[in-house]
Image: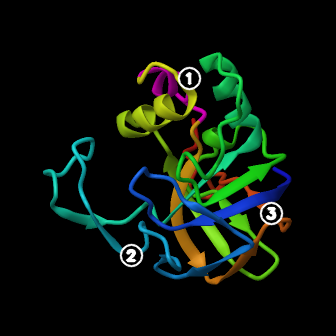
Amino acid sequence: MEPLNGKVVSVHTGGNTNLSKDQQPSIQIELDGIAGCAHRGYVRKCWTVDKQPKDSPRRNERQWSAVSVEELAEIASDMGIDGPITAASVGANLCLEGIPALSRLPKGTLLKFPSGAELIVEEYNPPCKYMGEEQAKLHSAAPTAFPKASTLKRGIVGVVEAAGEISAGDNVTVMIYKTPSWLARNSD
């Protein structure tokens, strides 16, 4: 499959109490995550939705998160709100455009940036009750409106493969993971 090409609309970091992140001109990507981001690190505590007991340590598969302007517009439309939903308000590190069905990119997909930074997709970012409550406050909506509207549209999370800087306006090349032919089972 040919790579997809998109663009970085905005970049964000931080860890505000309302789950949002602050927009920046650029962010520094390190092997353990994004400088200044609350999700940085190799280890994180488990939440109630994880397979492991709550608060126990596990590998951090959420060192970064990304959303697309196209999917954010769909979420806002599905919620029936007038104003836009922003990447900053949903706590994403990257807002991309031009990548169809960003939230459906498979695990192992690689995002490559001009600086040499590379990010690997771990999983789709599922709807979140707490983010639903924050979006309800921002948009005068029901607390369940955002989780319902963002199903399979909330973006992706992953880990850092190679360090570098990512800036608003950068191009991004998306190498969609495909099972290697030597690993695919033969149906004979």
Marks 1,2: beta carbons within 8 A: no
- Could you tell me if residue 3 is visible in this image? no
Query: Badge 3: how crowded within 10 Å, few (<14), some, or many (20+)?
Result: many
What amino acid is labelled 1 in the image?
A: Ala
Residue position for label 1: 149
Q: CA distance from mark 3 to mark 2?
A: 23 Å
Residue type for callout 2: Gly
Badge 2, how many Cα within 10 Å: few under 14, some, many 20+? some
User: To which residue does mark 2 refer?
Assistant: 41
Image point (64%, 45%), residue name: 105
Q: Vertical placement of 87 versus 166: above or below? A: above
| Mark found first going from the N terminus, 1 or 3 | 1
Measured in 3D between alpha carbons, the distance from the residue under mark 1 to the one under mark 3, in whole angstroms, is 26 Å
Tell me the kind of residue under disc 3: Val
Q: Position of residue 120 (x, y in %)?
A: 58, 64
Question: Can see residue 74?
Answer: yes
Separation (CA) of disc 1 from disc 2: 30 Å
The residue under the point 62% across, 68% down is 119
Residue 40 at what x, y percent from top left? 43, 73
The answer to whether marks 1 and 3 mark residues whose Cβ atoms lie closer than 8 Å is no
Q: Which residue is mark 3?
A: 172
> In the visual, does 4 lie left or right of 28?
right
Q: Quadrant of residue 133?
A: top left
Name the quarter where the C terminus is drawn: top right
What segment is highlighted magenta in the picture? 144-153
Q: Write the residue at 42% across / 61% down.
A: 61
Give the secondary structure at mark 2.
loop
- Under circle 1, the secondary element is helix
Q: Find residue 48 and report its image quarter.
A: top left
- Residues at badges 3 and 2 in contact (C-beta under 8 Å)? no
Q: Name the N-terminal-most of marks 3 and 2.
A: 2
